Amino acid sequence: MSEWRRLGVVVPSSNTAVEREFPRYAPEGVSVHTSRMPLESVTAEALDSMSDRVVECAELLSHADVHAVAYACTTGSLLHGPGFDEELEEELSAAIDGPAVATALSVDRALEELGAERVAVRTPYNEELNARECEYLEHAGYEVGSISGLGIEDNTEIGALTPEDAAEQVASVDPAVDAVFVSCTNYPTLSAVESVENELGVPVITSNGATLWDLCRTADVEPAGPGALFR
C-alpha cells in the first residue's frame, strides 16, 4: 500500500493560487488533489451560490481516498456568520468519511495557536465582504485593529496578484498588533510571509498558510511552511 498522504481541497473554479502554493509547501510524501466549485466573481451572492456544490465536490475527492479535505475559500466559509464554518466542516467530513477543515475556522485556529488577540487584516475584497470578515473575527473574540481591501471582485484578477502586492498592502499595517492576517485563498502570498514578518516583527498568517497548516494536522501530517505559524 502507498505511504503517501493524500490531501483533498475544494476550491472555487477560478482559484489559481491554491494549486501553486499547496504543493510547493506540502511536506514530502504528501499529494494535493482538488475539486472545483463554480465561481467567477467574489461577491456575497456568488459565494452563496457556490457553496451549494460543496458536497458534490467533496464526494468526488472521496473517490481518490483522500485522508482529509479542506474547503479552501475564506469568505465562502464565513459568509453566513457563526456556525456556518462548522456546518461546512461537518458536511465535508460526512462526504469523504474523514476529517475536514474550512478556511475561516483554520484561520481562527491559527490565530489561537499564535496567541493573537489584536489583528490587522488585509484583503483583496470589496467593503461588504470586509465587513463580514471583520464581524466573523470579532465574534470569534479577536480585536480587529484595522481591515482594508483592494475592492476586487473578479477572482481571476485576484489570482493575478503577486506576493509583492501582498507585501506592499501589508506595509501600511500598524505594528501594534499581535498578528497580521492576509485573507483570500486566491491571493498568492506565502512566499512573502518570511520577509514581511521580519520587517513588521509580528507573525503573518495567510488564508492558504492557515488552511494548509490545519489540513496537514488534521491528516496526521507534520505541517511545513513559511513563518511563525509553522515554526
Image: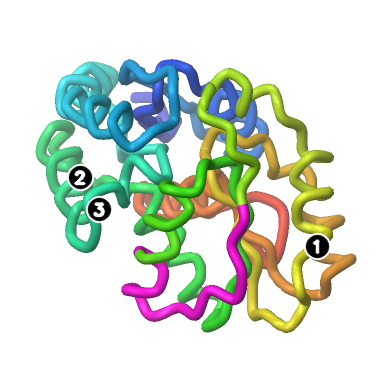
Magenta-drawn segment: 136-148
Label 1: how many Cα within 10 Å (few below 14, some 14–19, many 20+): few
The mark found on residue 172 in the picture is: 1
- Going from N to C along the chain, the mark reached first, 3 or 1, is 3
Task: Confirm whether the magenta stretch covers residue 86.
Answer: no
Q: Nearer the viewer, mark 2 or mark 1?
A: 1
**Quadrant in which the C terminus is drawn:** bottom right
Distance between the Cα atoms at labels 3 and 1?
Answer: 30 Å
**Which amino acid is tagged 1?**
Ser
The residue pinned by badge 2 equals: 88
**Which amino acid is tagged 3?**
Asp
Whole-percent x, y for residue 98 in the image: 19, 42
Q: Is mark 1 on a helix, strand or loop?
A: loop
Frontmost residue, 57 versus 157 = 157
Q: In this view, does 225 lie above or below 13?
A: below
Frontmost residue, 158 versus 85 = 158
The residue pinned by badge 3 equals: 85
Frontmost residue, 39 versus 222 = 39
Label 3: how many Cα within 10 Å (few below 14, some 14–19, many 20+): many
Q: In this view, does 227 lie above or below 76?
A: below
Q: Is mark 3 on a helix, strand or loop?
A: helix
Q: Is mark 2 on a helix, strand or loop?
A: helix
Whole-percent x, y for residue 142 in the image: 45, 78
Q: Residue at (19%, 23%) from the top-left corner? A: 53
Residues tagged 2 and 3 counted as in contact (Cβ below 8 A) = yes
Whole-percent x, y for residue 131 in the image: 43, 57
**Which amino acid is tagged 2?**
Leu
Task: Confirm whether the magenta stretch covers residue 138.
Answer: yes
- Going from N to C along the chain, the mark reached first, 2 or 1, is 2
